[in-house]
Image (cartoon, rainbow, N blue to C red):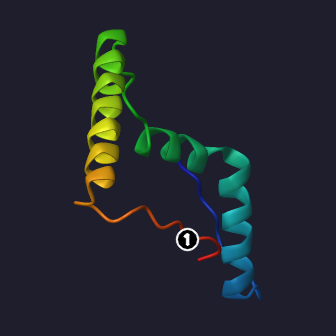
């Protein structure tokens, strides 16, 4: 779907850009492009379970090292 805007006589270039961006938003082309760009594949149920198990194991290992004093405690930053 092509979008074409022509500059009218005596119209400023800023006005043309404004009209173009408005028509682009109204057409929905930008939304479709963003959906395809940031599309994420859905993981299978088995992969979701495996990654959840891995996260839990890493969390336990991290807490263990933290208790042993090999890793400094977490410092939380608020209001960057």
Residue 7, can we see it?
A: no
Q: 28 or 48: which is nearer to us?
A: 48
The relative height of residue 38 versus residue 5 in the rendered view (above or below) is above
Residue 67, can we see it?
A: yes
Occupied quadrant, residue 78:
bottom right
Where's residue 67, x and y in %? 33, 51
In the visual, does 74 lie left or right of 15? left
Occupied quadrant, residue 64:
top left
Q: Residue furthest front?
A: 68
Picture residue at 51% right of the left edge, 47% below the top: 34
The relative height of residue 19 versus residue 42 in the rendered view (above or below) is below
Q: Quadrant of the C terminus?
A: bottom right
Picture residue at 35% right of the left edge, 30% below the top: 56
The relative height of residue 77 versus residue 39 in the rendered view (above or below) is below
Q: 27 or 69: which is nearer to us?
A: 69
Give the labeled residue for mark 1: 77
Q: 51 or 38: which is nearer to us?
A: 51
Where's residue 37, x and y in %? 42, 45
Secondary element at image label 1: loop
């Amino acid at each position: 779907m092509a979008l074409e805007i022509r500059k009218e006589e005596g119209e400023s270039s800023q006005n043309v850009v404004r009209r173009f961006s408005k028509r682009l938003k109204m057409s929905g082309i930008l939304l479709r492009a963003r959906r395809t760009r940031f599309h994420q594949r859905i993981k299978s149920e088995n992969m979701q379970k495996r990654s959840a198990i891995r996260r839990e194991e890493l969390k336990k290992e991290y807490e263990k090292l933290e208790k042993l004093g090999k890793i400094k405690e977490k410092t939380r930053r608020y209001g960057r």
